Image (tube, rainbow, N blue to C red):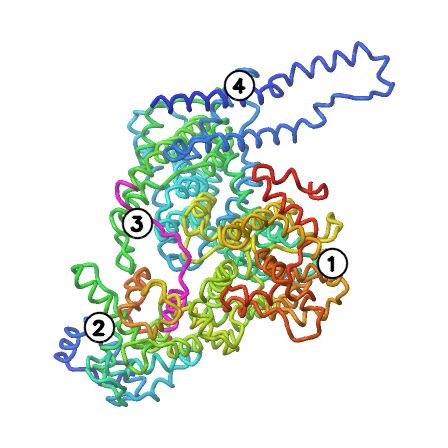
Amino acid sequence: MGSTPSLPAWEIRNLAHTTGFTSEQIEILHRRFLHLTDGKATMSKDCFDNIPDLESNPIKSRIVNAFFDQRNLGLQSVGTIDEITFENFLTTLSFFQHMGENHTKEDLEYYKTEKLQFLFRMYDINGDGKITLEELREIIDDLLSKTSNTEKTSSSIADAAMMEAANICGGQMEPDQQYDGITFNDFLQIMQDLKIETKMHVRFLNMDTSAICK
Amino acid sequence: MGRDRSGCVARSALLTALVLLLCCPVAGNTAEQESHTEHGDSHGSNDTSFHIVTFRWEHVQAPYVIALWILVASLGKVVFHLSEKVTNVVPESALLIVLGLILGGIVWAADHTASFTLTPTVFFFYLLPPIVLDAGYFMPNRHFFGNLGTILMYAVIGTVWNAATTGLSLYGVFKSGIMGDLDAGLLEFLLFGSLIAAVDPVAVLAVFEEVHVNEVLFIIVFGESLLNDAVTVVLYNVFKSFVEVGAENVEGLDYFKGIVSFFVVSLGGTAVGILFAFILSLITRFTKHVRVIEPGFVFIISYLSYLTAEMLSLSAILAITFCGICCQKYVKANLCEQSITTVRYAMKMLASGAETIIFMFLGISAVDTEKWTWNTAFILLTLVFISVYRIIGVILQTWILNHYRVVQLEIIDQVVMSYGGLRGAVAFALVVLLEGQHVHVKQLFVSTTIIVVYFTVIIQGLTIKPLVNWLKVKRSQQREPLLNEKLHGRAFDHILSAIEDISGQIGHNYLRDKWTNFDRKYLSKIMMRKSAQLSRDKILSVFRELNLKDAISYVSEGERKGSLAFIRSSSDVNVDFTGPRHSVVDSSVSAVLRESTSEVCLDMQAVENRAKSPKDREEIVTHHMLQQHLYKPRKRYRLNYSRHKLVRSDGEKQDKEIFQRTMKKRLDHFKPTKLGNNYTTKFKNMKKERAAKKKHSNAVPNGKLSTHSVSFQVKDSEAEDPSDGGINFLITPADNGSDEISAGIENPSFSVEEDQSGFQMIPPWVSNEETVIPSQRARLQIPRSPTNFRRLTPLQLSSRSIDSFLLADISDEHPLSFLPESSM
């Protein structure tokens, strides 16, 4: 792939500034981007079909959608766009960056919230700010697709999970009271014990591994 | 203070008594032997006649002494734990060493021989394997493999560094002449360095399990102590053979061979372990019909892996560790719940026992004047060097590792890591194995090793807890994972591996994803039972546990208004009792022991502590409630001894008691509101009536009953397939009609209601209408009111039960004394 056009230096510097990647990483990711798009400057959802390893991922479509979700790209509107640029691609990936040690506490808290936002949006498909029972059931369906075949199971797991969430966030519920969805604040509360900052990250190497990884 | 002292006095008195008790057979041993022979001589003519009783001490001596020692060690442990204060401050291992020293001293004073020492054979063949197997089998795999790189670094580089620097520094000091005249060269010092360098798994486990540091820190120190075995073995063997052939005969090629042998020993040991884990998993897949010996396979095959590796002179510790690590998933999926509990307890018992014996014998072994050679400079410098180089090594390696690690190892972690570098029985056994004719300073090495072991286990063991507290090291949090956390954790895994796929990186997640796929596609298919394959999803299992809890709370508080899940889907049965794993009900103990991935559950201590946590107590209480409310029906007499089949003993006595208590509670509950003063007579009427009813019910064929009874029950009797080795869920499927009914609902208050109204003389199951016991849930949803419950009164208690329940009400103090004979 020696002939791939590389990004101009100023753009790399810009991107490095906005996304926090190092310039080596950006170059590698750019090469990867071009590899996936077959050299085009924008990427559509089809491009993700070129990744064989992704096929076995039960929540593939959600992850792919997250790349096209306008909320993740810093746009205010809800919904997805059809094509993303390399900058968009990087922005999404930057959610998975490792937070360095030399940040203030507020910064870390901010990054943590950002990461959780990303996750939350992945669940909250319609963008109403709540994970409803239906949405929860869908994702559980996806997650269980490999091992379980009963629809009943996933819906009752969703029930249980929802109830658990309701218990954590709203205390004991009255039976006639409806808990209509997990809001982002509730989500934060549920996830507070999960050390998201240590879990939700991918190490972006400075080394090009695209030769090994198809 | 005063109380403390009296406590101490009491303890020491107890200890002395114990010691005396034990020493009698040991000390009196020789005297008895003599008198025995004398006896035989003087009555030589009578020898041919038949003796009614003969005293044959020699006949049983060896096993007897061993059993006694084990007993002492265990009793010692019991005594230590009488006081929480002592065990909170002093680690058990240190106490055991001291106990060993005292016992050894007494035996030595009485006998003037140190006949009991920790021999390498016993240690390596019998005491070490259970401990290491336990460690491997309960290894939190995800943490272990997640930190594998770090662990390997410390285990390999760190151990080599420690060995080399300690050996060389000691040699350097020796050259300067401070140590005086020792008959040793560079190789001897390196040999000593290599055996003293390794952090000891037994000591680390013993001390760290009481400290409860966070998982990452624990797994790093502990993993290091396990994996450094290969390095130790190779270094030890290499230098030992070098010493034997003599320094002048060592060629360059030998060094090269040494390096090659490191890879062979470590990778070979691992391969042997994995191979045996494969065999073990495969075997447990087919043990469905021999449930009783099922747990045995786990131990035998793991032990074989250890011996095989030992036979091939590979790293045996690595072999058995990896055997445990690799088989755990499949074994846990294949074995039935009881076998898993058996394996768990047996393994903990063996490991804990072996550990106890090791530390006590480490104490005893020191009492042997022949072993001791004192060389202040050598011993002190060894202590200094191993501590200093450990610290330097940890700091250097952590500095390198932190460039690659996500979760940085902080200064505090490094302090604990360097301080946790305990030396133990492995070093001792290795040094005893040295041959005096080649290593002329063996005595000194042995003495030094003993001092080092004592120093690290006692001094560092004593101080590490305050240190950890003082440094505020992150502790491990022990709690059950929430369903949501499990769900999101699973989602994480997929998201992360997808991101790695998309961005074209190869990382942990990529590898883990590939491995999971491989495992699902091939390994699990080969090594797991069909039924287990379906249900091994973690989300499902957490869900089942939660469901169980739900069910328990529902059953125990029938009248409580239903909670969300049950309201939401009232149309179908929510509690999936027919789940393929049948793990729905654990006894409270196994629930406490239930392992979860979120925690390192390598030690009994933690298990015990967990049992004390309020949440678990609550859980136990709920389990207990469950037992109270839905105990099993009285069983007909059944032969309950069989070598091949485990008959569940119902603990009838206990059931009775629970029963009485339940009845009494109900009665009390009912008394003030409904009955007034004359309830006893009412109950007597009731009793008669019930006796009559019972006749009816016995006449009713069983099959008809189960069709009428709750979906819950029907499902349950399906679940009770004998081939699944049955957990009796709540109600054992009825073997006779009356039992089944009585399992349905037992609430005297409502039957009294019935009595009063004189309504419904014909039991519902006799009439052919669609009456009927509503389903479990229906019952729960119906508010508890007399009118509703009138229909639910198929109360069927045996006359005996009623007697006991009446009696229980009369006499609170001695409920058991009124029990019918049969239950005694």
Q: Amino acid at mark 4?
A: Trp
Q: CA distance from mark 3 to mark 1?
A: 66 Å
- Disc 4 packing (10 Å; few <14; some 14–19; many ≥20): some
Q: Nearer the viewer, residue A112 or B425?
A: A112
Q: Please identify the quadrant where the C terminus of chain B is shown.
A: top right
Of mark 1 and mark 4, the one earlier in the sequence is: 4
For the point 76% across and 50% down, which residue is it? B639
Q: CA distance from mark 1 to mark 4?
A: 75 Å
The disc placed on residue B692 is 1
Q: Is residue B543 above or below residue A76?
A: above
For the point 52% across and 61% down, which residue is it? B555
Q: Chain of mark 4?
A: B
Of mark 3 and mark 1, the one earlier in the sequence is: 3
- Label 4, on which residue? B108
- Label 2, on which residue? A24
Asked if residue B427 is among those painted magenta in the image, a careful observer would answer no
Of mark 3 and mark 4, the one earlier in the sequence is: 4
At numbered mark 4, what does the secondary structure look like: helix, strand or loop?
Answer: helix
Does residue B142 appear in the picture of this structure? yes
Q: Are marks 1 and 4 on the same chain?
A: yes
Q: CA distance from mark 2 to mark 3?
A: 35 Å
- Disc 1 packing (10 Å; few <14; some 14–19; many ≥20): few
Q: Are marks 3 and 4 on the same chain?
A: yes
Q: Nearer the viewer, residue A162 or B51?
A: A162
Give the magenta part as a residue range. B469-495
Residue A80 in the image: x percent, y percent? 27, 86
At numbered mark 1, what does the secondary structure look like: helix, strand or loop?
Answer: helix
Of marks 3 and 1, the one in the foreground? 1
Q: CA distance from mark 3 to mark 4?
A: 45 Å
The disc placed on residue B621 is none
Q: Chain of mark 3?
A: B
Q: Are marks 2 and 3 on the same chain?
A: no
